[in-house]
Image: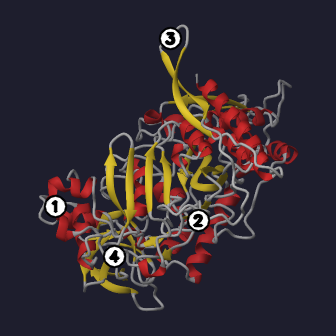
Amino acid sequence: MQWYSRFLIWVLVVLAGVLVGCRHNPPPTPIEITRLVVENVPVTATPGPPLEVTTIATTTPVAPSTDATAAQPTGPRTLTICLGQEPVSLYPHAGFSLSATHVWQAIYENLYTNLDFGYQAVGLAKLPSLEDGDARLQAVAVDAGDMVVDVHGFVVRLGAGVTVNDGDGGVVTYAGTPLTMSQLVVDFTLRPLIWSDGVPVTADDVRFSFELKYGPNVDLNAAEARIAAYEALDAHTIRYTSLPGGADADFLARLVPPLPRHQLGDIPFAQVAESEAAARLPLANGPFMLTEWLPGDHMTLVRNPNYYRADEGLPRLDGLTFLFTPNAEDALARVLAGTCDVATQESLNFADTPLFLQSEAQGLLRAYFAEGPVFEHIDFGVVSASTYANKRPDWFSDVRVRQAMTQCTNRQQIIDETQYGKGEVMNAYVSARHPLYPADLAVWPFDVNAGNALLDEVGYLDGDGDGVREDPQTGEPFQITLLTTAGGELRPQIGGLFQEQMRACGIDVLLKTVPAGEFFADGPVGPVFGRQFDLALFSWLTPVRPPCNLYLSGAVPGPPATFAAGWAGLNVTGWSDTAFDAACAAAAAAWPGTPEYVAQHQEALRIFAGNVPAIPILTRVKVTIARPTVQNLVLDTTQQSELWNLYAIDLDGN
């Protein structure tokens, strides 16, 4: 009955649009306006059990005020937010949950934000930098058995045959004598944050959170996370020291949010995560604090009286209510009806985008779209595992075939038909909006004629006139399988369009979907990470630091005896390029923002785009909606939650 529920929402949109139209054109005498209310009522279908559907009801008509200067309501300014699911826990180390992340924006001050492919200090006094001296590279002697980061970015114990970057930036292989390597030392300084009980937040609270995150065996677990030392130097300064191995471009990710030692410190470690003080009613250092959590229904939050920015008039609002709304149609209906001011991204169904756009056009809500950090791509099996490669022609080793197939792919059509035109064509493993995207990057625009000409040039011709080209060496038809995950809507849609587009270039693509557990299984059994596929459609993240590590030669998965990464490697294409490896390694060893960092990342991107070991397709788009009265809501590509600035979000006319 989902179609019926959606139909009723359409009715709500249309009727509400009429209502808005009446408000925009008031007659000279007062008129009555009927308020629209959304409620769930049981509808008995035959056959089957009673169903809950969204319906429209009316309440007592009210006459609008004709006085434009009439006083606004003076009650508490409370924002109601529809969450897609109820958080299991608010404990920061309990695992990732987008719904919990939204609530964290209210109760915990972000130490930094991650907006527009960059970082901005918030709860930190500043971002550390080499220029200011609060970040520095220091030389350190290492020998056999020491934990280091190798040239491929893996944490390993130094031993014979391990290749690392030495202190001068050169690549060396350990041969049994001590080496000098570089390690990063960073000092983070906190702003004068205060817990909601009035106790100041200290650097020791950050150290305490670090201990809770890495557990009783903190030193070993931290080493696996690239951390050599984590110290509270004074009340507001935390020092992080990396494992030897370079500049650690992800140093901000090593910073953990503070947790109150004075509140949680006496709880046995094994009980902290499940304690009410950590998971259900935590102390806050952000703009709001939690006062009520009614399971299955809502959370209530009020202003934190000890918020350190209170003298700036922040937060703007008096309180928040988080409603748990697991049904996407219900979330949309609540925003239209005014019982929710904001519906967060995970509470909505992207397939309802036409509804969002029509409602926005009628002035009923605002729809916010942003490219997300997830990009879909089709990887070529450039160099497959020998057991698989021996069963098929060598379709993809010639770069011209990969370039041709990219030109035969109408990625804009895929975006238009799967994401309603939202998003952009990807040409590499970063978006064209990324600050490191090179202006001279090779792109392979949709051009069937050019793609066919390249395939002709390589020798893939349709000798028998059946519409499918043949391999010039074996005569086998150019028939390949595109493997992707079952269960979702987007990838089968992308796969079907790609299959259709390849026909115009004489390539017969068979689409095969398998359960995600099978698709992503480790090699040698897993088809993708065992490198036993022709084409594989899946996604990677494209964070602030361009993920060139995904395509390193040293990241090709394979038997540990002969492959550096073993079966944990991520470069499932098998593609290998020494110049790309060198550029990526140099970028990893450079400090973010330096000329070397920029130049080497851009060089790696150019090499990737020219060689196309994978066809980047699109970035997944995220959407949130809000009532027109909501001010200062910003949905950003790289910031996880659209509620990142809850301290500044406001309601107009409340």
* Quarter-of-image position of residue 153: bottom left
Residue annotated with mark 3: 48
Three-letter amino acid code at disc 4?
Answer: Pro
- Seen at 28% across and 76% down, the residue is 201
Kind of element beneath mark 4: loop
Looking at this rendering, what residue extends furthest in the front direction?
29
- Looking at the image, can residue 290 be seen? yes
How far apart in space, not on screen, are marks 1 and 3 (Cα)? 54 Å
Rendered location of residue 506, percent (x, y): 79, 33
Q: Nearer the viewer, mark 3 or mark 4?
A: 3
How far apart in space, not on screen, are marks 3 and 2 (Cα)? 60 Å
Camera-nearest residue between 7 and 273: 7
Question: Is the C terminus in the top left, top right, bottom left or bottom right quadrant?
Answer: bottom right
Precedes in sequence: disc 1 or disc 3: 3
Camera-nearest residue between 490 and 62: 62
Residue annotated with mark 4: 244
Precedes in sequence: disc 4 or disc 2: 4
Three-letter amino acid code at disc 3?
Answer: Gly
Kind of element beneath mark 1: loop
Residue annotated with mark 1: 216
Q: Please say if 486 is above or below 628.
A: above
Residue annotated with mark 2: 580
* Quarter-of-image position of residue 308: bottom left
Q: Please say if 350 is above or below 8.
A: below
How far apart in space, not on screen, are marks 4 and 2 (Cα)? 23 Å
How far apart in space, not on screen, are marks 1 and 2 (Cα)? 40 Å
Three-letter amino acid code at disc 2?
Answer: Phe
Rendered location of residue 464, percent (x, y): 84, 24
- Seen at 56% across and 58% down, the residue is 542
Disc 2 packing (10 Å; few <14; some 14–19; many ≥20): many
Rendered location of residue 532, percent (x, y): 52, 37
How far apart in space, not on screen, are marks 1 and 4 (Cα)? 23 Å
